[in-house]
Amino acid sequence: MRVIPVLDLMQGRVVRGVGGRRHEYQPVRSRLSETSGPLDVAQGLRREFGANELYLADLDAIQAERPPSNAIAQLAAARFDLLVDPGLRDVADGRALIASGVRRVVAALETSHGPEQLAAFVKCIGSESLVFSLDMKLGRPLGDPSRWSGDDPFSIAVQAVDCGVNCLILLDLASVGEGNGVPTSDLCRRLRKRFPSLELITGGGVRNRDDLMRLADSGVDAALVASALHDGRLTRDDLHGL
């Protein structure tokens, strides 16, 4: 199982996400970097953990429909392997990010207009470049679940796969940064049984190596982690042999 560090970007800085309460987010304080600048934080993660694959959530673009952060192009130029949630709303924005050096773009449930739009994204951007994020809060799907047939996370995940998605992120924002463990293990296990070849990524609340091992046992391919990397609860040795 891979560990993918998370960078939540807001107003040009990496911020520490806690519980999905974005109005409370503050610039991250990390043992890995002297500043909260995205490139500084990313380089610190690379030095300490050998991390080249990063997940970026562009919160200004997601919340206010602003243009993608300039930091995305800087990180791509520094040869980071980027998975970016830009609050994707149209095909052109996704294609532009891919052209700028982003490897995969996220279409998120939070900003989704339903399965028809998702199928169009997959067709136009490509199933290897388009990832669907099933965003939840306290286990309930975000956005407008009425656009989907069934409003439970498993049903929406099945519909996303039917749209051509072959990589799925499961993220419960209520658990992010809280250090209480990851609540999506059972859902991951169900999806792994239903879709053996589906790439599954999850996170939110990872505390230590034991949490990572539990996710690996649930069939997860990659775990999204932020706070535990910055504050030292996870070390480079902890990431070996997952």
Image (cartoon, rainbow, N blue to C red):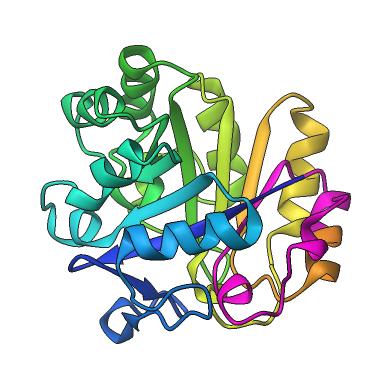
Instruction: Give 241 or 24, whichever is nearer the viewer.
Output: 241
Query: In this view of the protein, can residue 97 be seen by the observer?
Result: yes
Query: Is 205 included in the stretch rendered in magenta?
Result: no
Q: Position of residue 81 (x, y in %)?
A: 47, 37
Percent coordinates x, y for residue 175 in the rendering: 57, 74
Q: Is residue 73 left or right of residue 104?
A: left
Quarter occupied by residue 7: bottom left
Residue at coordinates 58% horizontally, 25% vertically from top-left?
Answer: 166
Q: Is residue 176 left or right of residue 75?
A: right
Q: Who is closer to the viewer here, 24 or 145? A: 24
Q: Is residue 239 left or right of residue 52?
A: right
Q: Is residue 237 magenta?
A: yes
Where, quadrant-wise, is the N terminus in this rendering? Answer: top right
Q: Residue at x 54, y 54 (%)?
A: 46
Q: Is residue 94 above or below residue 204?
A: above
In the image, the segment drawn in magenta is: 215-242
Query: Is any part of residue 86 visible from this angle?
Result: no
